[in-house]
Image: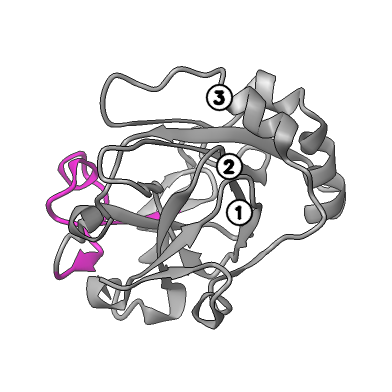
Amino acid sequence: MMIYSVYDPEFKPYGQVLSGYDTACLVKAMETIPLPEEGTAYEPSIPVLEATCNYGEFQNNAYGGMPVQLGMCWGRNTKLNCLEYHRDSEVNVGAGEFILLLAKQDEIVDGVLDTACVKAFRVPAGVPVEVYATTLHYAPCNAAKDGSFRVAVVLPRGTNTGVPGAKPKNEEDTWLTARNKWLLAHPESSEAGQGAHIGLKGENIDIAAFI
């Protein structure tokens, strides 16, 4: 599998690199949080990260003054498993280099996306990247075979919390697994086993052989 850089033109339909940010304080704070013993962890809002100088900058600049949360996804991962999207952009910053597996919302056909559409992008340490609202994404991947990742996740406050209680009005509503989180699961994923919408077909991509 080809792994592009977020500085390559192939990344342009999926997001953009955000310039002008010094993320040293955020990276330092992320590195104080221990890795999980196995797999990955995610918390939508982490006080030690929201206490950094970057929190206000992302809220007031990247999100134009909208209320945001600053959390983290961290651990070890090389597989696709699922793809999700929100109604707005997500900003990611890695304490170290990491890889994103991405696809486009308009590539979903009849509620299903072929994983052959997925592309991989390498993100340098400390570089903020905006992942557009129409870009499907999920847990980051290690950039090294036996490595790990810590990736800050900036989203509008309340995203990825709770489960909306509204009665579904259409098919897409049944893909909601949390607030502002629409999820497509691969049949092999644990999320599918927990009842998530099976919306990925094809290979459950594993980049272990390519890093």
| 165 displayed left or right of 210 | right
Nearer-N-terminus badge (2/3): 3
Residue placed at 54% from the left, 67% from the top?
Answer: 6
User: Residue 145: percent from the left, percent from the top?
Assistant: 26, 45
**Mark 1, residue position:** 90
| 47 displayed left or right of 22 | left
Nearer mark to the viewer, of 2 and 3: 3
Tell me if mark 1 has few (under 14), some (14-19) or many (20+) residues whose alpha carbon lies within 10 angstroms of its own.
many
| Residue 130 visible in image | yes
Q: Nearer the viewer, residue 102 or 109?
A: 102
User: Residue 133: percent from the left, percent from the top?
Assistant: 58, 65
Q: What element carries label 3?
A: loop
**Mark 2, residue position:** 153
* Amino acid on which the number 2 mark rests in the picture: Val
Nearer-N-terminus badge (2/1): 1
Tell me if mark 3 has few (under 14), some (14-19) or many (20+) residues whose alpha carbon lies within 10 angstroms of its own.
few
Residues under numbered marks 2 and 1 in contact, where contact means CB atoms less than 8 Å apart = yes
Q: Is mark 1 on a helix, strand or loop?
A: strand
Q: Is residue 68 magenta?
A: no
